Image (tube, rainbow, N blue to C red):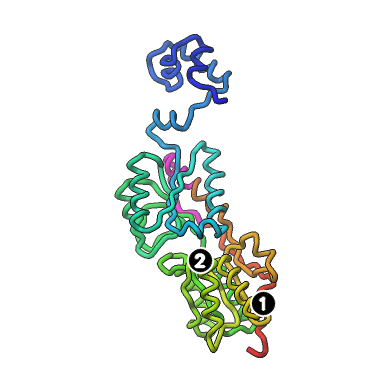
Amino acid sequence: MAVTINDVANAAGVSKGAVSYALNGQPGVSEGTRTRILQVAKELGWKPSLRAKGLSSSKAYALGLVVARDAKLLSTDPFFPAFIAGIETTLVRHEYTLVLSIASGPEAEEKSYRKLVEDGRVDGVILTDMRNNDSRIALLGELELPAVTLNRPDTRSPFPAVCMDDTDGITSAVKHLISLGHTRIAHVGGPQPYVHSRSRHGAWARTLESAGLGTDLFIEADFTAAGGAAATESLLSRPNRPTAIVYANDLMAIAGQSLAQTRGFNVPEDLSVTGYDNTEITQYLNPPLTTISTDPLLWGQTAAQLLLNRLNGTPAEDILLQAPRLLIRGSTGPVSPAD
């Protein structure tokens, strides 16, 4: 059971008010009494609650994360649980907490940020899923709420960012498929308003163009398993179907590979498949998924620490993480002579 101020007061033989003055460094008690109270508190193992610390310092001792994605995706995509776990492992060392909000749309998202500030619930926020002309940058500036972004937005931003170049991984995947003889390489991307979705699409297109190959085999999906399966169904139904598909995340790739196998396609003999994220389950598929390895746990840890540094007055500059790398497994192989 946690030691309370009342416990300290009883043990020291003083009033609760005297304990409060002593523990908060306020005048109202003699130095001798203050020293005795502090010693008793130490012996009893008393620690201030986050609520009490917040009341005495005007800090919330919490960071915010507002996620504007379908709750179903958050429950099935392994990226976010790992990312959130990374944030938490950093915050717990600094006795901070995470306030997580799920927003159903732009209006709800803006309302969430305003509510966090109005209620004084957080000291700063971490921004994910940067978007084209992201309106959140101006909003947080208006609210005077410190922030850290995952990758730099495509608009001017006063906030430090944790950056990772996700183009290298996609470029490596496409080059790998070209080296196997594939010329009809499709891409199932995420929502294009997201900066990272456009970045991955751009890397796919540029690599194909540099090899003199077409870029018409593209479908914009939504990062969900259902979206990946639907996009795969559409691509495989085309007269000049792709012989390889590069997916923007593992969840869509897993669903796409399963759909293709259900339709009678052998992977990789008839269709090569690549994912993105290297979630744990990908190595146990049949065949194991060729994917691009990222570290969402590290992203979360680094973003949280960067924001805490900024809140503590440490100059905060962008941090560049190691670029993702291609992991070649059994879901990619040479193009079939028949294709």
User: In which image quadrant can residue 24 be found?
Assistant: top left
Name the residue beneath numbered marker 1.
267
Q: Which residues are magenta?
A: 305-320
Q: Which mark is residue 223?
A: 2
| Label 1 to label 2: alpha-carbon separation | 21 Å
Name the residue rendered at 69%, 71% in the picture. 287
Q: Is residue 32 in view from this perspective?
A: no
Q: Secondary structure at mark 1?
A: loop
**Looking at the image, residue 44 lies above or below residue 143:** above
- First of labels 1, 2 by sequence position: 2
Residue 6 x %, y %: 48, 17
Q: Is residue 307 magenta?
A: yes
- Residue occupying image coordinates x 55% and y 38%: 93
Q: Residue at x 57, y 58 (%)?
A: 78
Task: Provide residue 266's location: percent of width, then percent of height.
Answer: 67, 79
* In the image: residue 109, left or right of residue 8: left
User: With respect to residue 165, does 103 lie above or below?
Assistant: above
